[in-house]
Every structure is written in C-alpha cells, then in structure tokens.
C-alpha cells in the first residue's frame, strides 16, 4: 500500500493510478482542471448543448434534477433554474436512514419553487435489498445507488424530458479520472453506471429471489430502462461538474444563500459538516470502504482540501488519523434498530469484507480498541506520513 505524495489517497482506491513521481491521477486531473481547462469554453459547450438538444415544447419540463437535498442538488438546481431559467422536475429517491437535516434541506429545495417527486420505494422490498447488498458485496447502500441512478431516468423517459442534470462525476471529484474517457466525464448513461456506479458487479436482476419474495416486478424502478426505450427517448444524462467549476468553498457560498443548511457538528465519520448529511447509512457505506481499502470519508475530504490548497498535506494526515476508521457507533445503532439486527450481527456481516492485511491482529484475531475501532497497521500510518 502506498500513498500519493501530494494528497493522502492510498493506491488501494479502485481505479486510481499513480505516475512516476508518486502522484495520483486525481491530483494530476485537479492541476489540469485549474490550469489548462478553458471554463469559458466549457460553459459555451453547455449552452450549445442546451440549444441543440433542449426542450422546445413549452408545456414540458426542461430537465430532471435528481435531488437528495445535499450540496450537489442545490448547486445543480442553481445552475439550471437561476442561471439558465430552465423548468426542472426534481426527483428524490428516499434515503435509507434519513436525517432531520436532510429532510430540512429537501424541504428547502421544494421551497425554492420547483415540482418535486419524492419517490418512496416499497420499504419491505427495499429493506431486503439493503441487507442483500450488505451480505453479497459489503455495501448496504447498493440498492440506494441503484435507485438513485435509475429512477430519474425512468421519469425522464415517461415525461419525455431531454436532460438529467447530475452534480460532479465522482471520478473527477475523488480520483480515478485517468481511467475515465472524456465522454464518461460529462455524460451519464448505462455504460457509465455499470463501470463507475458503485454496483460491484451486482445487477438488480440478480436480486430476484423466490425464497426472499423479491420478484422482477418489484425491481422495475431499480433496473435501468432498456436500450430501446433509452434510444427512443433520445435524452441525455449530464454531469454539471464537467461544465462548471465544482469547488466546495465556492459552491457552499452559493448554496447557503439558497437556504442550504449545514449540520450542527460534524458527521460521524469525518470532520466536515456539509456533506453526506441526508442519509446516515452513507456513513456506513464509507465505513465499509475503510474496512475494504483502508481509507474513509475523512481521506476523501482531506484530499480535496489539500488539492485546493486549503490545508497542507501534514494537516490532511492529521485529520485522517483523527477521524478515519473510527467505529461509527451512532450510525451502526440506528441501522441495527431499523433492520432489527444486533451489533454482533452487524460486525459479523462486515467481517468478510475487511482487508486483513491492513489491520493489526493477535494470533489471527483482529485487534480492536475499546470503542470497537480496528487498529490500522503502524507501517501504513508511517507510510501515509512519509509517502
Ligand atoms: Zn493525490
């Protein structure tokens, strides 16, 4: 395991490449983003695209904006509605463990003056899918990713809406950009979803299970619309972060003016108070990521801030050491309550996904601190400090 010499990302991150100088491609793509990308030209490209493929029917919506109430949904709405005067239809896929602040922010989206479809999935089926994703691929948010990516496309086709506007492509934000084609940086479609949508090779169809009472029909909204339907629709999914600078400090100043609220106090798995606010289960997804790859949400956030020059690499390391990998007790308890399992059972479900090479063990048994946190091997802590 090695670390980027500029940020604090390890090479265990899927799809991340390092160059000869030991710098990760997320850092390199950040440098390019700020030095060589002509943002004015990108903005013109966006406007061209609106003109060429946009809605010409005044009785129809111009675009779909998938919203959670988070920071990206606010900013995307800002560009579509305030900057370009488009008529959006917002679509929210109900989160797994919704939070008070998430509900407030979603209500704020609505208050800004848009039509909003709040898609409340069948909770009996959804709960089964959540547990299946947890068991099979170590990701309790698998069904949520599937729903978030697919449901808006179904609505776009049904209502004949030409655009779906997403925030920033995760590969641009968090790394892995070198392996992503130019098209995939700006365009969302089924190929993108299969390659980069966090699906771990699992398809909704794989979840059909007579014993578990899940039928194909239960999954229709989770299954990406068929190629024929998509072609007939002729619309497109667009990552706004390709066309407009996506930068936390700048974005927050815009969306706070729109009424976006931060959390009082940081989220449980990191030091920030403005991201992943709408769903507690996303914190567990990040915890599992830590168990699999040895880095969590604090690393993601620190890398972005190191690249933006807000903190030094040394400060980033300190934040990561302080917050990454701590056992997220509050989220685990809430999850266990909701899904009627015990904490032992939760830990046992995590166990097969732990990368044992990363953590200390005693005679084969993983070492845990009193608070339940696994102990990261000292040699990796050292390597992160001195890449
Ligand atoms: Zn880096």
Image (cartoon, grey):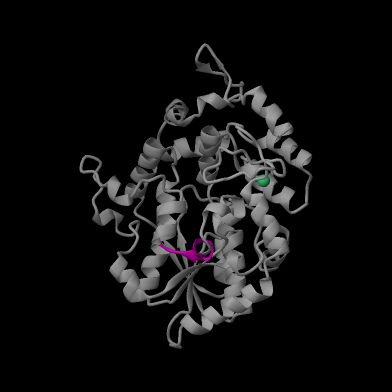
Q: Which corner quadrant holds the N terminus?
A: top right
> x%, y% of residue 175?
59, 50
| Residue at the far front in the pictured view | 20
Q: Is residue 308 above or below residue 344?
A: below
Magenta-tinted stretch: 183-189
> x%, y% of residue 62?
48, 79
Depth order, front residue of 124/86 = 86
Toward which corner of the image does residue 381 lie, by quadrant?
Answer: top right
Q: Which residue is drawn at 28% across and 50% down?
A: 205
Depth order, front residue of 171/324 = 171
Toward which corner of the image does residue 131 lie, by quadrant?
Answer: top left
Depth order, front residue of 203/216 = 203
Does the rendering let one see residue 288? Answer: yes
Q: Which residue is drawn at 29% across and 46% down?
A: 206
- Any magenta on residue 160? no
Does the rendering let one see residue 252? Answer: no
Q: Which corner quadrant holds the C terminus?
A: top right
Q: Which residue is drawn at 68% across and 37% down?
A: 320
Toward which corner of the image does residue 250 lie, by quadrant?
Answer: bottom right
> x%, y% of residue 210?
20, 43
| Residue at the far top in the pictured view | 363
Depth order, front residue of 281/185 = 185
Q: Which residue is drawn at 25% across and 41% down?
A: 212
Left or right placement of residue 328 versus residue 379 in this view: left
- Any magenta on residue 186? yes
Left or right placement of residue 305 versus residue 367 in this view: right
């Amino acid at each position: 395991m090695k670390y980027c010499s500029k940020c604090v990302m390890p090479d265990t991150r899927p799809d991340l490449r390092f160059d000869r100088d030991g710098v990760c491609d997320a850092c390199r793509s950040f440098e390019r983003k700020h030095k060589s990308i002509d943002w004015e030209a990108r903005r013109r490209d966006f406007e061209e695209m609106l003109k060429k493929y946009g809605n010409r029917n005044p009785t129809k919506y111009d675009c779909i904006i998938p919203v959670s109430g988070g920071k990206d949904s606010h900013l995307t709405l800002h560009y579509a509605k305030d900057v370009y005067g488009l008529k959006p239809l917002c679509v929210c896929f109900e989160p797994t463990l919704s939070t008070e602040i998430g509900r407030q922010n979603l209500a704020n989206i609505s208050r800004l003056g848009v039509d909003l479809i709040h898609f409340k999935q069948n909770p009996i089926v959804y709960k089964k899918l959540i547990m299946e994703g947890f068991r099979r691929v170590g990701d309790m948010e698998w069904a949520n990713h599937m729903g978030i990516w697919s449901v808006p496309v179904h609505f776009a086709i049904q209502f004949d809406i030409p655009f779906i506007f997403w925030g920033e492509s995760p590969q641009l934000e968090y790394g892995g950009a070198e392996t992503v084609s130019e098209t995939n940086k700006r365009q969302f479609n089924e190929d993108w979803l299969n390659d980069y949508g966090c699906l771990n090779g699992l398809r909704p169809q794989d979840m059909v299970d007579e014993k578990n009472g899940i039928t194909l029909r239960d999954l229709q909204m989770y299954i990406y619309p068929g190629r024929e339907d998509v072609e007939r629709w002729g619309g497109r999914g667009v990552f706004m972060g390709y066309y407009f600078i996506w930068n936390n400090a700048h974005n927050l100043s815009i969306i706070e003016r729109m009424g976006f609220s931060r959390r009082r106090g940081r989220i449980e798995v990191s030091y920030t108070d403005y991201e992943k606010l709408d769903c507690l289960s996303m914190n567990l997804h990040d915890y599992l990521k830590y168990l699999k790859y040895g880095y969590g949400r604090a690393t993601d956030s620190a890398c972005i801030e190191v690249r933006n020059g807000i903190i030094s690499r040394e400060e980033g390391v300190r934040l990561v050491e302080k917050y990454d990998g701590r056992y997220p007790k509050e989220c685990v308890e809430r999850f266990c309550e909701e899904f009627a399992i015990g904490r032992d059972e939760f830990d046992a479900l995590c166990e097969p996904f732990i990368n044992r090479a990363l953590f200390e063990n005693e005679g084969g048994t993983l070492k845990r601190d009193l608070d339940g946190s696994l102990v990261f091997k000292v040699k990796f802590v050292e390597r992160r400090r001195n890449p």
